[in-house]
Amino acid sequence: MMKLVTTLTQSDATHPPLVLIHGLGSAATAFKPIIPELSKNFRVITVDLPGHGQTPFDPTQPMDPKSLGRAVFDTVESEYRITVFHVAGNSLGGWIALEMAADQPSRIITLTGIAPAGLWLIPASGRLPSEAQSYYLAKILRPVIRIGLHSIALRKIGYSKVSPKWQELSYEICYDSAFAMGNAKGYFPAWDGMLGKRFDAHVPETVPVTILFGDTDNTLPYPVSQERSLAPQNCSWIVIDNCGHAPMWDHPDLVATLIKETTQR
């Protein structure tokens, strides 16, 4: 069972539910910058995927995006008796959200993909060590990360490729993400779950979809990882200026606004 966190008080339970799904090697904490604003309008529920954040790794859990999406459905229903909700996901979480909307569209009200993975024509056939540099760095530095992240030099190494605004990222964002990466036992299983695959399922036009990408996304760069023909035909496709792979860090107010606008469509 995944770890879910609801961020609202009991009196706010009448708000429409919004499920947030993080990316590979990340955790629910990645959405901290946008949760306060979203909580004004939604019952925000964040998910820690298997082997990420507070959810233990379960070797019996299939880790491909479609299976993870079904696990999110099951967990939200089991924990909160919520069967229908808005969803937003970053990176792998965005791909999972797309699979959920294709698999069980009647249960997804709207979808916001925040730099979603899976939109590539040629799927990767294997792991490339160079693509796991952030993971290995976080693992190596785990014993000293709390103090080390006060160093501008270390922050540059860890975040300059993730965000063009890396110097403006708060210590909390950097620490949360480094801690999550360094402790993500599900990192490679989730990575392997993506190998040989891309998102190529059909999302019905009844589900409003917005896709957001940063103009300087070095993790899923344009054009090879931003193939618009694979996205739902009815989606709004938005490119955010001066923005990297985690738009909710670089432009939290804008991302919260775009999620709200999507839910009103």
Image: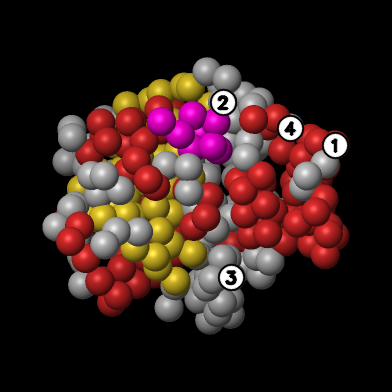
Side (left or right) of 131 relative to 244: right
Please name the residue that numbered disc 3 is placed on: 51
In this view, the mark in front (4 or 1) = 1
Instruction: Decide: is 222 above or below 128.
Output: above
Instruction: Decide: is 96 above or below 41.
Output: below
Residue 135 seen by the camera: yes
Please name the residue that numbered disc 4 is placed on: 160
Residue plotted at (54% across, 58% down)? 27
* Residue type, mark 2 in image: Cys
Tell me if mark 3 has few (under 14), some (14-19) or many (20+) residues whose alpha carbon lies within 10 angstroms of its own: many
Could you say which quadrant of the image residue 219 lies in?
A: top right
Tags 1 and 3 touching, CB below 8 Å: no
Marks 3 and 2 sit apart, C-alpha to C-alpha, by 28 Å
In this view, the mark in front (2 or 1) = 1
Tags 2 and 1 touching, CB below 8 Å: no
Q: Earlier in the sequence, mark 2 or mark 4?
A: 4
Please name the residue that numbered disc 2 is placed on: 243
Report x, y in % for residue 167: 70, 30
In this view, the mark in front (3 or 2) = 2
* Residue type, mark 4 in image: Ser
Q: Does residue 121 belong to the magenta stretch?
A: no
Q: Earlier in the sequence, mark 2 or mark 1?
A: 1
Side (left or right) of 26 relative to 231: right
Which segment did they paint magenta?
246-253
Residue plotted at (30% across, 68% down)? 76
Could you say which quadrant of the image residue 250 lies in?
A: top right
Residue 221 seen by the camera: no
Side (left or right) of 166 relative to 43: right
Instruction: Give the color scheme: rainbow, by chain, secondary structure or one colour.
Output: secondary structure
Please name the residue that numbered disc 1 is placed on: 153
Residue plotted at (26% across, 55% down)? 43
Q: Earlier in the sequence, mark 4 or mark 1?
A: 1
